[in-house]
Image (cartoon, grey):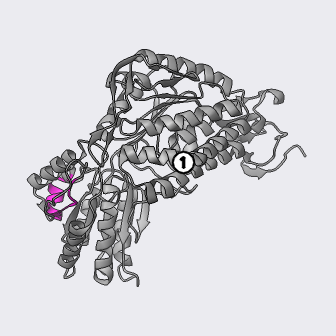
Amino acid sequence: MQQKVLINGQWQAANAESEFSAFNPMTGEQLSEVYPVSSWSDIDKALSAAVESFVQLQKISRETVAAFLERYASLIDSNKNAIVEMANLETGLPLSPRLADVEIPRTVGQLRQAAQAAQEASWTQPTIDSANNIRSLLTAIGPVAVFGPNNFPLAFGSISGGDFAAAIAAGNPVIAKAHPSHPGTTRLFAELAQKACEETGLPQATVQLVYAMSNESGLKMVSDPRIAATGFTGSRPAGLALKKAAEDAGKLIYLELSSVNPVIVLSGALEQRGNAIAEEFALSCTMAAGQLCTKPGLLIVQENESTDSFVQAACEKFQQGPVGTLLSPNAADHIAAASSELVAAGATLLTSTRELEDGRFCHSNTLLEVSGKSFIADSKTFQTEIFGNASLIIRSESLEQTQKILSLLEGNLTGCVYSAEDGIDDTDYDLIAATLTNKVGRVINDKMPTGVAVSPAMNHGGPFPSSGHPGFTAVGLPAAIKRFAALKCFDNVRQHRLPDLLQDKNPDGKIWRLIDGAWTQGDLGA
């Protein structure tokens, strides 16, 4: 029997075009639960319900929205064992530490941060020009669609992750589209979210869930007049197709796509601690089978007397390290095909194929190398993202060649530089820093890029194609909320008709407001 979809507050049988089941990546076996691929009529009903919900949400206090997020976080915490067990079954990600000790706390924590941001409301940026009686603030934008990725079923999930939390905190209803790799995990979250809606009094269509839809329906959904914005994390081809459909219709879409996250090892660092950096590099590339959006897909090392030993150490670590489980049945084929493409373009394969278990979704840890000259000659091919436990070392002939390589990079989420601890290569750092900074959203020193802290200062975004817009982040509250907000201006509007945050007597007096060019906090009517 097919699982039901959540539309307009009710779990109901889908109007399905077809059906699917997830896999257990540890065994390769298809799981027994069956999920619908919804027809357009399901999406149409969800969109109409979301519009009605948005009208109601505009009358709901931010305290109620915050209460929902807090209650949802508590329900997740109380039901975490069932969630992580289902996620482990569907993704092969370890119960501990990955799911139970990392992703669940992060998921609960960012929902609670979103609750705090919703109530505190500084993200709305109230601005008052009293001389002209003009006031403005950011406010909810309307129904939001969220497409979640396969690699973080909890912390980036379509109905539990950062995009969801940010959209709800702004006061928007969300239509979540599950990822086919973990539909059961998403269903468990949806059940808890719906319960939290009922308990806190949010409109019944604040949270809705469909499991899958055709490509045509997905394009139609993101461009529908009833949708205000979309959050998408996933593959570059799918994201670009959705981007074109949304933007052709004048709709907002925020994307996290591909990123090779370059790491540059300067000569001083290479000589001082090359073996340690090689070990960090290998671990960063192979943890979670390399299925992290911040995995270092490129490492640039300048040729000197320490380069050969560094490359050899990295190769040994790749060869000897554990081989992680991949998330999907075709992931190993994608790694093999992409590696073959790089070899055909002139790269050298440094690692050998290992004997692996039958059935499990996996691929041998893979390390390749290429000369800086070859990279420059075909930079587009050599910076193609390989999503998985594979990476490419670029052997640069000089600092000038490294600078040229960086100038040819597409936009990335992160860029890291390892430099000497005693500062002997600070001049080299200064020469490449500006170029690197313009190519990435987050500049890192002396540590690998894997790992994204949920911090107000974090930027998990970057120049295209790492994301769809370099001015926004998918992680870090309250900044992430602004993606799902609209700027509203009130010109000569009477006091009692203004939003409470723009009235001269601010009810709570707790947030900063820009008044006549100065930031002010407190009860302005006192």
Where is residue 268 shown, x and y percent of the image? 31, 81
Say which element carries label 1.
helix
Give percent across and percent down for residue 450: 40, 60
Q: How many numbered discs?
A: 1
The image quadrant that residue 499 belongs to is: top right
Q: Quadrant of residue 282?
A: bottom left
Residue at 36% across / 69% down in the picture? Answer: 417
Between residue 265 and residue 132, name the one nearer to us. Answer: 265
Q: Is residue 140 left or right of residue 295?
A: right
Q: Is residue 191 above or below residue 318?
A: above
Q: Nearer the viewer, residue 124 or 151?
A: 151
Residue at mark 1:
80
Label 1, residues with CA under 10 Å away: few <14, some 14-19, many ≥20: some
Q: In this view, does 108 lie to the left or right of 459?
A: right
Identify which residue, 209 or 425, lies in the foreground. Answer: 209
151 vs 42: above or below = below
Q: Would you say residue 365 sits in the magenta stretch?
A: yes
Q: Does the magenta stretch include residue 217?
A: no
Q: Which span is picked out in magenta?
A: 363-379
Q: Can residue 118 be seen in this view?
A: yes
Residue 153 can be seen in this image: no
| Residue at image coords 15%, 59% | 355
Does 525 sit above or below residue 32? below
Q: Which amino acid does label 1 sit on?
A: Lys
Residue 171 locus on image (x, y percent): 63, 34
Quadrant hosting residue 200:
top right
Left or right? Give the position of 16 relative to 409.
Answer: right
Q: Is residue 178 above or below residue 101?
A: above
- Which quadrant: the N terminus? top left
What is the residue that sits farthest to the right in this orientation? 526
Residue at x-position 77% and y-position 27%: 493
Q: Residue 364 at what x, y percent from top left?
A: 20, 58
